[in-house]
Image (tube, rainbow, N blue to C red):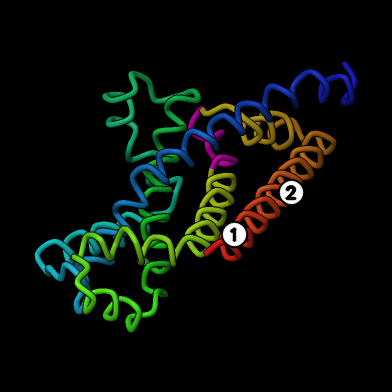
């Protein structure tokens, strides 16, 4: 089988596996990372729900989790992945590991986005009688929306980069294709094709995220 025929056979399924795991991990990053980021922001010193007993341990845990390289974290999570997912290989396991990596990453990105909201605006709203919860919902979240979208775009791109490495731990997708055929079998055609597809995927995500953030900024 020629390189071109092999590429036609394998690239489509590998791309689909990468998109699926990326989308699923991005969903969990948003679902859990956004509330965590809001909690970090709200309980920080000088903010609406200042609470050092919550903020400091949570902040330390997220920092520690982010400090571990992806491959080391993925390997160390194998027992937990097997316990929760039922297997330590395949797309489901890859989604779990990628989510564990992406959630603290986006939590920090979201926290930084919330910190960009003008404190004078928050104080003005509070002085007009708004509760702290109302201020979070009606001021902090809407004002930080463009930055949140930009941060989520960066998170998705980080997930794509990490998903390319799940091939080392038995995950499917472009990473496994590049490792199994491009690296282990020294197939330069496969390697170049995978790199080109990953670049195109990143560019597409960045373009869409930028357009969405610009639209949110105009609406704000």
Front-most of 15 and 213? 213
> Residue lying farthest front?
128
> Which residue is depicted at the point 49% across and 23% down?
90
Residue 5 visible in this rendered orientation of the protein:
yes
Write down the region rendered in magenta. Answer: 163-170
Queried whether the magenta region covers residue 73, the answer comes back as no
> Which residue is depicted at the point 59% across and 48% down?
161
Residue 218, image x and y in percent?
A: 61, 65
Could you tell me which secondary element the residue under label 2 belongs to? helix
> Residue lying farthest top?
1
Name the N-terminal-most of marks 1 and 2: 2
Residue 197, image x and y in percent?
A: 76, 40
Front-most of 89 and 206? 206
> Which residue is depicted at the point 35% across and 66% down?
140
Which secondary structure type mostly characterizes the magenta part of the structure? helix
Residue 3, image x and y in percent?
A: 87, 25
Residue 67 visible in this rendered orientation of the protein:
no
Front-most of 180 and 20? 20
Total residue callouts = 2
Which dot, 1 or 2, sits closer to the camera?
Answer: 1
Using residue 147 as the reference point, say whether residue 218 is left or right of it.
Answer: right
Could you tell me which secondary element the residue under label 1 belongs to? helix
Disc on res. 199 = 2
Q: Tell me how far mark 1 sits from mark 2, CA to CA.
A: 21 Å
Which residue is identified by label 1?
A: 213
Queried whether the magenta region covers residue 164, the answer comes back as yes
């Amino acid at each position: 089988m020629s390189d071109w025929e092999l590429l036609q056979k394998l690239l489509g399924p590998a791309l689909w596996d990468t998109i699926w795991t990326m989308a699923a991990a991005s969903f969990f990053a948003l679902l859990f990372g956004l509330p965590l980021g809001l909690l970090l922001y709200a309980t920080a010193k000088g903010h609406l729900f200042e609470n050092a007993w919550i903020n400091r341990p949570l902040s330390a845990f997220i920092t520690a989790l982010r400090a571990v390289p992806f491959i080391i974290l993925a390997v160390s999570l194998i027992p937990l992945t097997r316990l929760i997912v039922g297997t330590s290989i395949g797309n489901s396991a890859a989604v779990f590991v990628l989510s564990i990596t992406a959630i603290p990453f986006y939590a920090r990105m979201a926290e930084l986005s919330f910190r960009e909201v003008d404190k004078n605006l928050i104080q003005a709203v509070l002085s007009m009688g708004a509760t702290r919860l109302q201020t979070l919902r009606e001021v902090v979240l809407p004002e930080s929306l463009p930055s949140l979208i930009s941060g989520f775009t960066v998170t998705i791109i980080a997930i794509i980069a990490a998903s390319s490495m799940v091939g080392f731990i038995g995950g499917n997708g472009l990473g496994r294709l590049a490792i199994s055929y491009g690296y282990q079998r020294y197939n330069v055609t496969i390697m170049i094709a995978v790199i080109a597809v990953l670049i195109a995927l990143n560019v597409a995500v960045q373009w869409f995220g930028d357009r969405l953030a610009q639209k949110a900024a105009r609406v704000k």
